[in-house]
Amino acid sequence: MSRGQYILRRIVQMVPVLIGITFIVFLLVHLIPGDPVLTMLGIHARPEAVTALRHELGLDRPLWEQYAIYLRNLVQLDLGDSIKYKQSVASLIQKRIGVSLFLIGYATVLTIAISLPLGIAAALKKDSIFDQIVRSLLMVTMVMPAFWVGILLLIFFSIKLDFFPVSGFGEGLADHLHHLFLPALTISLSIAPILVRSLRGSILEAMSADYVRTARAKGLGEQVVVMAHVLRNALIPAVTLLGLSVGYLMGGTVIVERVFSLPGAGALLVDSIGARDYPVVQSMTLIFAALVILVNLATDLTYTFLDPRVRLG
Amino acid sequence: MTAASVAERAGAESVLESVSRRRRSRFAAFRQRNLLAGGAIVFAIVLVAILAPMVAPRGAQETDYNARLKPPSREHVLGTDNLGKDIFSRVIYGARIDLQVGILSVLSPFLIGIFLGCIAGYYGGKIDTLLMRVVDIVQAFPFLILVIAIVAVLGPGLRNMYIAVAMVAWVSYARLLRGEILVAKHREYVEAAQAMGMRDPRIIGRHILPNVISSALVYAMADVILYIVLAASLSYLGLGARPPAPEWGAMITEGRTFMATAWWMSVFPGLAIVVTGIGFSLLGDGLADALRPSRR
């Protein structure tokens, strides 16, 4: 199978999953106990307003028809209107998603910057005190709730030491990087342990492989063996794992944007829940899921380029 | 080969054997250490939760307006909050809520996932294809975001969190069990049971499940802490337990307002989560290691 055919097949395989997630997101509103329109507008809403919103949301039609309309609107990129902000959900999200994507990208870079040296050093010094310390620390950071870590970092680095701003996104790239350092670090600390663990494992596995023994037997220096032979092979599973962690990254942004009062899409989701602005909640859930699927696809495809052994069958 | 060299070789082999035996026993001891340490931490937390009224120096909701926002001292080991409640006592009472949340949240996805995973793996065919497509779809969502969205529509509170987790988390157990059963169903003991004319539920329940459930149990152990952290995060977003409940996440959230002046309000409940998390992680790792040889 050629690479083009493989890509096409993966995209075709994605279609039922995409339809499935739209169906789940569509059903979300129907999970609301009681009358969803009354829940959104409040029990003191005027009957005309209730009827109007019910009609606008299409809730007065049969379920299958509602879903068909929902799909048709989605294809036209019409995500409906926000009840709280009185504007289209698409434009609302457009304004906020940039902050979240910046945060996710920044957190990914920091995660790599933390995990790569730690994973390599822990594997090369297997069972040493350093390795034990790294593994113990990872066990601790893995079970720390992200919002708690965020609060601790805020108390120490922003309030006590005044190194970083307490909240906000800033103006310009340097300012963004400064403002978002602690939020990105908070997310990284929850993902890095998984990556370090995987990296350490795959490096150790690669070190005992035949090709490494051959490289050493050829008289190559340890540095060349590690960099050219071990790392090249051990990095591939780590790259995949990082791609698959994008769901955790997105979950992390929802919490962290709240802790650091960032004007991102995650914070929009939380605000909309408080305001019972369900069209926004639905659309945000859908967009986050669609992003995860796209990133997973991209990871899969990258994998085929990185590792020539991957069979495209 | 001379007699001397044979003896030398035999000696070397016995040395090697004893070294490898020693290494094996050291490894076994290390494995047991994880299991024992994790078990001891979890046991201690369970004990503290059960004996909370006896262990805690004060009530969880007992206020003392003369001792508001006091830092840790001999009288209040972990300090007090803005209403003069003793943080140490609240952390102890919190163990009751958080352990319950962790264990109850695991229970339904564990049972639903195992039931559906067994059916999909054992019977295969259309039912398997359908279930696995549903699993694919649910797993496409970021876990936290889907749980948040479901709790958002059902309404805040721990009960709705249990429902949301059950709706989302069963897929991991179903996928895990299905994979295990796909391998196990072709084993001789299963074919023997089928040849003896046993009915399917009996074969699954009596013969297959006891052999494949260990991996799901290890997974569940790791999930307990995942759900404690999840409940804490939901409390922080205003979707879980509400203050003044002494749930650890709600306590951290209460402390956020006072973080500049009373760091202890947020720090200690968080530490309680970390210690519980380490306990369950060690227990899960130890259990995984202990069960591994029997699965080979």
Image: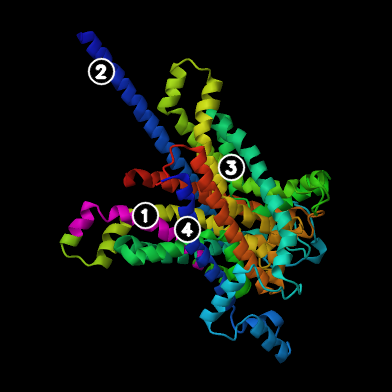
Q: Which residue is mark 3?
A: A138
Q: Chain of mark 3?
A: A
CA separation, marks 1 and 2? 45 Å
Q: Chain of mark 1?
A: B
Q: Nearer the viewer, mark 1 or mark 2?
A: 1
Q: What is the x, y in percent for residue B155?
A: 62, 74
Mark 3 against mark 1, which lies toward the viewer?
A: 1
Q: Which residue is mark 2?
A: B10
Task: Indicate the amino acid at tag 1.
Answer: Gly
Q: Which residue is mark 4?
A: A12
Above or below, A92 against B70 in this view is below
A57 and B237: which one is in front? A57
x then y, percent, for residue A95: 75, 61
Measured as percent of width and height from the top left, residue B194 is found at: 19, 61
- Residue A181 visible to the viewer: yes
- Mark 3 vs mark 4, CA separation in Å: 39 Å
Highlighted range, magenta: B167-193
Label 1: element kind: helix
> In 3D space, how far apart are the residues under numbered discs 3 and 2 (Cα atoms)?
44 Å
Specify whether B222 is left or right of B194: right
Q: CA distance from mark 2 to mark 4?
A: 63 Å
Secondary structure at badge 3 equals: helix
Of tags 1 and 4, the one toward the viewer is 4
Q: Secondary structure under badge 4? A: helix
Q: Are marks 3 and 4 in contact (CB under 8 Å)?
A: no
Q: Position of residue B85 (x, y in %)?
A: 73, 63
Residue B53 visible somewhere in the drawing: no
Residue identified by numbered label 1: B179
